[in-house]
Each structure stands twice: as C-alpha cells, then as structure tokens.
C-alpha cells in the first residue's frame, strides 16, 4: 500500500478503528488501552500482555490484533491515554501558572500510574494528547522572559523535561522500595539515624551536616513544587 510512510503501516492514531463485529463483546482501542492501564496499575508493565488483556475483556487474543499490531502500539495508546489526564483543560493566568499546572498534573498522573514514569524520557511521545501537552508546554515556555529564539526554547524544554523525569522517577522509586521492603522513609531514617549522627559528629562532612540539621524537610509535593520553582527561575534567567 502506498502511504506517506512508505512500506511501513500508518501510526495507530491514523488508522481507522476496525469495523464493528457481530460479537458479544464490542471492542475499541480506547477500551483496550483502558484495560491495559488497569493491568499495569496493578501489576506493572510486566503484567501487561495481549493474552491477559483479552482475558479481562472476555475475547480471544487474536481479536486484539485488529486494533494494535504489536506491544509497542499498545504502549503508545496507554501513554497517550495518560496524557489526556495531564492536558490542561482551561487557560491559566500566564506562562508560569501553565507550566506549574502541567508539571503537577504530570506528577499526579505518574503517581496514579507508576509505570508511566518508566516510559518518560524514552522515545518521543507523539499521540494526539501527548502532542497537545507538548504544545501547551512549549507555547507557555516560549512566552517566558529571557528566552529568545528556538535554540533557547529547546534548551529550556530539555532542562524542564529532565527535571520532571528525574523527580518523578526518584519519588516513585522511593514508594516502590517502601512497599517492597516494608520500610518507609521515616522508618529508614530512624534506623540509620544513630549511624548518621556519629558520622556527622566527626566533623568530616560539614556541608552534609548543615543540610541535615538546617535544611528544610518537606513533604514530597512541597519538595517537587520548590524544586520546580527553582528550575523555572533558572531557565528563564536572561542569558549573557
């Protein structure tokens, strides 16, 4: 078939839904993606397979291949469904408010769907909802002071995305470790507190001691917001 993609099939978002069948269970890509997301939320990405999705939906596995040709397309649909949760539905009061809203919605979505963070920073996300979030982010940042030209915008977007990916993966990893070990951050700090106290009292780590004794100890959401503010302040500072 002659397509704009040569011999490759069109992306899943550009292929029409298969014609409905006279079958007991009606399917759609949205329904398949929602079922896959439910499995991933409960069991991680390793718990998602065509056979398991088909079993949840009460259909034969081969029916799913009318809608997605491989696991990669399935992940694309799942990711884009999460981006629909992130998309800002209404105008915000200025570039910074828009970016803060998108960042916090991204955090909320990642905490609701922990597997989502595993897919951030890999290949570009090009579904319609991902593109909408990307456009809103880039448009807001392009209005920020201190950014002039495409190169500055690309650099700023790179820094912002790197912060989001790192912050979300760190927070989610901490949650997962706490669940796996049965030891939350408070219990871990309590267990290692005497050791750390002895080490800091040696005087060999004065800066670490200042951070431990005088630094702010915030809740994860507060830490995320404070660090996000620092990033936005930094990337929008006029360059020499």
Image (cartoon, rainbow, N blue to C red):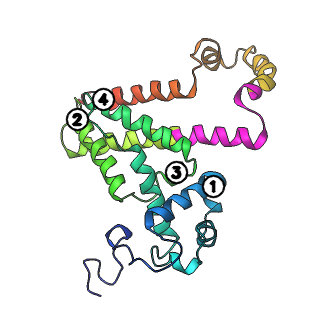
Cα separation between marks 4 and 1: 33 Å
- Give the residue pinned by disc 1: 44
User: Which numbered disc, 3 or 1, marks the residue that appears first in the sequence?
Assistant: 1
> Does the magenta stretch mainly form a helix, a strand or a loop?
helix
Cα separation between marks 4 and 3: 24 Å
**Magenta span includes 185:** yes
Depth check: 234 or 22 in front? Answer: 22
- Give the residue pinned by disc 2: 147
Q: Residue furthest left?
A: 149
**Mark 2 burial class by Cα count in 10 Å: few <14, some 14-19, many 20+:** many
Depth check: 143 or 90 in front? Answer: 90
- Disc marking residue 96: 4
Percent across and percent down for residue 14 are 31, 70
Report the quarter where the N terminus lies: bottom left
- Give the residue pinned by disc 3: 116
Q: Is residue 231 left or right of residue 111?
A: left
């Amino acid at each position: 078939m002659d397509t704009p993609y040569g011999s490759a099939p069109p992306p899943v978002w550009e292929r029409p839904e298969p014609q409905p069948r006279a079958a007991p269970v009606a399917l759609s890509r949205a329904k398949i993606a929602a079922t896959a997301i439910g499995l991933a939320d409960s069991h991680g990405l390793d718990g998602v397979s065509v056979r398991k999705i088909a079993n949840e939906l009460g259909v034969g596995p081969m029916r799913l291949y009318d809608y997605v040709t491989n696991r990669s397309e399935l992940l694309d649909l799942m990711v884009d469904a999460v981006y629909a949760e992130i998309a800002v539905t209404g105008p915000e009061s200025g570039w910074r408010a828009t970016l803060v809203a998108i960042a916090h919605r991204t955090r909320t979505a990642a905490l609701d769907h922990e597997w989502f963070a595993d897919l951030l920073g890999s290949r570009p996300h090009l579904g319609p909802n991902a593109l909408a979030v990307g456009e809103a982010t880039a448009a807001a940042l392009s209005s920020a002071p201190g950014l002039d030209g495409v190169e500055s915008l690309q650099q700023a977007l790179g820094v912002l995305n790197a912060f989001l990916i790192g912050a979300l993966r760190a927070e989610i990893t901490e949650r997962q470790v706490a669940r796996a070990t049965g030891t939350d951050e408070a219990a871990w700090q309590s267990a290692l507190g005497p050791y750390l106290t002895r080490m800091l009292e040696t005087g060999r780590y004065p800066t670490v001691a200042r951070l431990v004794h005088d630094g702010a100890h915030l809740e994860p959401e507060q830490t995320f917001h404070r660090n996000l503010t620092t990033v936005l302040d930094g990337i929008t500072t006029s360059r020499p």
